[in-house]
Amino acid sequence: MLRPGARIVLAFAVLPFLPLSAHAQLAVSANDGKAVLVDGVSSVPTSPAADYVAIIDLNTSPPKVIAEIAAPASVVGPPQSVAVAGDETFALVTGAMKIDPADAKKTVPDDALTVIDLKSSPPKATQTLQAGKGAAGVSINRAGTLALVANRSEGTVSIFSIADKTLTSVGKIEFGEKSGPSHVAFLPDGKTALVTRDGDSRIAVLTIDGNKVEYTKRDMAAGLRPYSIDVSGAGDVAVVGNVGVGLGDNDTISLIDLKASPLRVVDTVTVGPTPESVSLSPDGAFVAVTVVNGSNRPKSSPHFNDYGLLKIYSISGGKLAPVTEAKVGHWCQGSAWSKDGHTLLHQCMVEFEIMVFGFDGKTLAPKDPIKLKAGPAGIRTAGR
């Protein structure tokens, strides 16, 4: 039964689903049906597919979709629009944009935050809450007691307490309308979080004490428009993608030393045009970078490339170093690692698919992709 004020989201589709105990490793993909690329312009199709969430079993080879649930999703914002609790009991999905009620060919900012019970058989949506306009990056602390949502369109971070897989709003942090909070990531101890602000090119440091979350007024400057961010499982480093201003120039990713006092940026490397997403391997030794590479531009643009890039960098001694890369599809979004670090899922919006790669520490080997019914826009695994 839903708590008072919660809105029901009906199941989208149910695929054969075994009890969760048989699936110790899940990936959750949020898929946007209302955004397609038409000659370099994100457009609403005449008959948009429904937004939905796909639950993917990473324990099988190849990985496969085992359940689908209707929920608001959006390609707008970093691909960390999904968060999965460390014990895989529930997931959160944000929806930054919705179809404009006054014009079906346009979208407007949305504030949707959906709770998905992964333990139920089949998984189901149990709550839809309001975060803030342009609700984008979302994260859950390791204890599973607190969630933070970055609201790009209103310059805030929403705070939610969690009990029994039920969320309750407990406040917001204001950064200013033009700050553009994009993603928020907890450090493993749950006492600190980092917020990327692509509007004013800052990374804000938050302190956390129970449900009390405060902005320390301490900012870091990694690069132009920090956007996606991920923290290592050991809590020693974080990597941030700096997306730049989209004029075709090469952009950067930066390494943050989380053991330094105060926290600080220690390395920045050039990766190519628009690093949409960064995702650290479970052991923190590698970072996968989604480089859009002009694949979302009009074909007439001098900056157009007919492919994106998935790049892997190693992390050692406070430095980022290139390891390997692979050509991928168009307007690609997030990546997610298997627990052993040998499988990597990579979302491509235009192709409506998740590419699957094997990784041996040196090379990427493509495998059969996962086909979807809408554009994959956000993805996470437990604890990432």
Image (cartoon, helix red, strand yellow):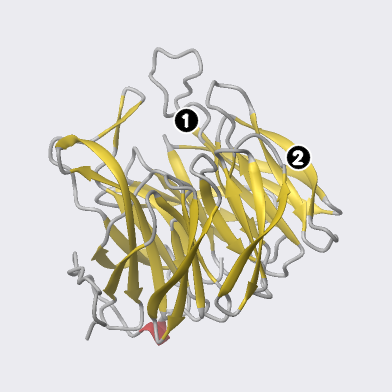
Residue 73: x and y, percent?
A: 32, 54
Crowding near pointer 2: few (<14 within 10 Å), some, many (20+)? many
Q: Residue 271 or 198: which is nearer the viewer?
A: 198
> Left or right: 51 with respect to 184?
left
**Please, is residue 160 above or below residue 97 in the view?**
below
> Left or right: 13 with respect to 276?
left
Residue 349 visible (yes or no)? yes
> Left or right: 37 with respect to 61?
left
The quarter holding residue 217 reads: bottom right
- In 3D space, how far apart are the residues under numbered discs 2 and 1 (Cα atoms)? 24 Å
Residue 290: x and y, percent?
A: 54, 42
Label number found at residue 51: none
**Please, is residue 355 above or below residue 178 in the view?**
below
Q: Secondary structure at mark 1?
A: loop
Viewer-side label of 2, 1: 2
Q: Residue 201 or 126: which is nearer the viewer?
A: 201
**Please, is residue 231 above or below residue 118 in the view?**
above
For disc 1, the marked residue is 307
Residue 292: x and y, percent?
A: 50, 34
> Left or right: 24 with respect to 239?
left
- Viewport quadrant of the N terminus: bottom left
> Which kind of residue does numbered mark 2 sit on?
Thr
Residue 146: x and y, percent?
A: 51, 75
Label number found at residue 268: 2
Q: Residue at x 31, y 61 (%)?
A: 53
> Which kind of residue does numbered mark 1 sit on?
Tyr
Task: Indicate which disc, 2 or 1, sits on the residue closer to the N terminus.
Answer: 2
Crowding near pointer 1: few (<14 within 10 Å), some, many (20+)? some
